[in-house]
């Protein structure tokens, strides 16, 4: 099963400093048919204006992965963590029993990112934050784990969820494959370029919900950069 969710049909809002689109029900956008996909609860496509961002606010019981597409995001939280995550790189935050954080675009240009929330395996636990660079060249033509749990997965950042967040860059005309285990849910978005998923065409920033497909074959119609989440 492959279901395309065109970018132009996503929920969302424009707040001046923030232009956001929601693949799943979030904030003022509520669609009973799009509450989640397996353990994937939120996939927001955010564009944040320079010198603006999300002020300090709380979260609990959620695994939050941020994939920066362009620009950079600067993180600060109530644990004393601080860091800047640039384009192509990833940060993760396990909200656990509770954490307050701020995400700010301190750059001169617009920052574009995907923010992905995944339901954890268990509630509570000590909150944490981490970030890591993932060079785009290292995932050329193949899917590389960027964040994963509950067991370690190469250089992937750890999350407390039965899920993998993966990235790939694929040249036009080439194909990358990913094996999807029985009963799993996958969600895929191209941050740039158009593609085909098992023969079904999707445009840039369209959502692709996938289930009951043993192999996901992604063929690039243009040079593409892809983020894929595989979750229970």
Image: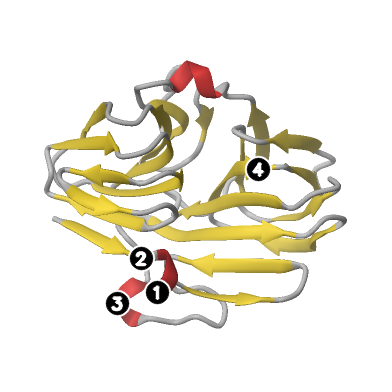
Q: Which mark is residue 6?
A: 2
Q: Label 1 crowding class (10 Å Cα cut-off): few <14, some 14-19, many 20+?
A: few
Q: Label 3 crowding class (10 Å Cα cut-off): few <14, some 14-19, many 20+?
A: few
Quadrant for the N terminus, please: bottom left
Among the 4 quarters of the image, the one containing residue 75: top right
Left/right of residue 192 with respect to residue 132 in the rendered view: left
- Give the CA separation, mark 4 to mark 3: 30 Å
Comes first in the chain, label 2 or label 4: 2
Q: Is residue 95 visible?
A: no
Which of labels 3 and 1 is toward the front?
Answer: 1
Q: Is residue 147 visible?
A: yes
Q: Which mark is residue 33?
A: 3
Q: Residue at x 62, y 54 (%)?
A: 97
Comes first in the chain, label 2 or label 3: 2
Q: Nearer the viewer, residue 59 or 123?
A: 59
Q: Residue 2's spot in the image, x, y percent?
A: 18, 55
* Dot 2 and dot 1 residues touching (CB under 8 Å): yes
| Label 1 residue SS | helix
| Label 3 residue SS | helix
Which residue has dot 4 on it? 70
Left/right of residue 133 with respect to residue 17 in the rendered view: left
Which residue has dot 1 on it? 9
Which of labels 2 and 3 is toward the front?
Answer: 2
Q: Is residue 138 above or below residue 186?
A: above
- Give the CA separation, mark 3 to mark 1: 13 Å
Q: Nearer the viewer, residue 39 or 169?
A: 169
Q: Nearer the viewer, residue 48 or 59?
A: 48
């Amino acid at each position: 099963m492959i279901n395309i969710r065109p970018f132009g049909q996503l929920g969302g809002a424009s707040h001046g400093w923030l232009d956001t689109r929601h693949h799943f029900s979030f904030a003022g956008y509520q669609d009973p048919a799009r509450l989640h996909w397996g353990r994937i609860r939120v996939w927001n496509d955010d564009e944040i204006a320079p010198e603006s961002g999300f002020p300090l606010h709380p979260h609990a019981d959620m695994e939050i992965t941020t994939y920066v597409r362009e620009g950079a995001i600067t993180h600060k939280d109530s644990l004393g963590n601080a860091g800047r995550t640039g384009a192509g790189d990833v940060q993760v935050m396990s909200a656990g029993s509770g954490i307050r954080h701020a995400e700010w675009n301190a750059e001169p240009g617009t920052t574009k990112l995907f923010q992905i929330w995944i339901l954890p395996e268990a509630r509570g636990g000590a909150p944490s934050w981490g970030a890591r660079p993932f060079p785009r060249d290292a995932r050329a033509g193949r899917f590389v784990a960027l964040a994963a749990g509950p067991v370690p997965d190469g250089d992937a950042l750890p999350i407390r969820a039965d899920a993998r967040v993966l990235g790939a860059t694929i040249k036009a005309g080439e194909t990358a494959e990913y094996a999807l285990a029985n009963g799993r849910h996958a969600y895929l978005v191209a941050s740039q370029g158009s593609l085909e998923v098992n023969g079904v065409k999707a445009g840039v920033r369209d959502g692709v919900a996938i289930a009951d497909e043993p192999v996901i074959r992604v063929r690039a119609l243009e040079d593409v950069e892809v983020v894929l989440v595989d979750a229970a």
